[in-house]
Image (cartoon, grey):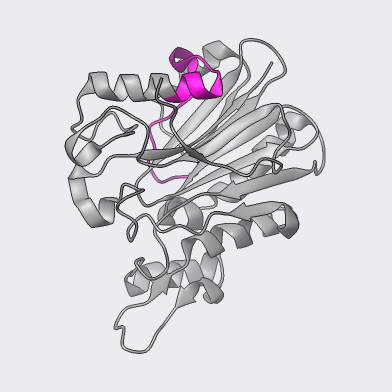
Amino acid sequence: MTIPPLLHIPDLFPSWIRWGFTTRHGGVSTGPYESLNLGWDVGDDPEHVRENHRLLAESLGYDPETLATVRQVHGHRVHVVRRAADGRTVRGQQGDAVVLVGGHAPPLAALVRTADCCPVLLASLDRPAAAVLHCGWRSTVRGLVAQAVACLWRELGEAQPTLAAAIGPCIGPDAFEVGEEVAAAFAQKVSLDVVLRRPGRAKPHIDLQAAVRLLLIRAGIAPTRIAVFPRCTVSEPRDFFSFRRDGHDAGRQAGVLALSS
């Protein structure tokens, strides 16, 4: 069996959480989707995508039929999954984050797909509960991070439980050139510090990972419990899919986690 490689830090989350960020390696897709494309609607052979999902599910020990995924729309809606059947229910619904509350069989799992946006994983250090977030620029300035953290706290029934976070590969600041309206939104909703203006560049650039990290800290997660994978999807074509680089031929990688029973 091909085992999809995952970007992972062993001791960041508790042992009951299996997680990672996929690259484009370890699957069966071909052509521009080579090889672990996890996007269903990008033009890849559906059987290849199905097999890629099966390989990923087998490597992390969850059932791909109950995987919780949503139709990502760059908003701030968060879905909660407490049992395997909920994973089927939320599939196809609009949203950009899924909170998992586990502790029972079968294992719960959730995934967000990205091709330049920032995948974010959150986890409680005390109980089997976690979340996956799809942080594009719109969902970031619209408050998705705060919404997801607050939802996770409510499900845990605690004022401020101990959480850790992992910020996955996304478009890097050198590649993330934006218009003035996007720069203004980040300056207003996040911080002027994440808006980069460099000599010789006519337009501003955004450090999306820095923006997400700052919002996680504001939401109550300790800086020492936030891990960042500083990889740029645009500038690393060997390892990552990128919509900005490849357009509609871009596959999708993912941030994924599974809670053991």
Q: Residue at x 54, y 63 (%)?
A: 211
Image location (x, y in percent) of residue 86? 54, 16
Quarter of the image for the N terminus: give it: top left
Image location (x, y in percent) of residue 193? 55, 76
Quarter of the image for the C terminus: give it: top right
Q: Residue at x 19, y 43 (%)?
A: 249
Closest to the observer: 36 or 191? 36
Taken as a whole, is the magenta stretch helix, strand or loop? loop
- Is the residue 34 above or below the residue 87 in the image? below
The magenta stretch spans which residues?
A: 56-75
Closest to the observer: 154 or 161? 161
- Is the residue 187 above or below the residue 96 in the image? below
Image location (x, y in percent) of residue 115? 34, 47
Q: Residue at x 31, y 47 (%)?
A: 241
Where, by quadrant of the figure, is residue 56 drawn? top left
Query: Quick check: is 22 in the magenta stretch?
Result: no
| Residue 42 falls left or right of residue 199 | left
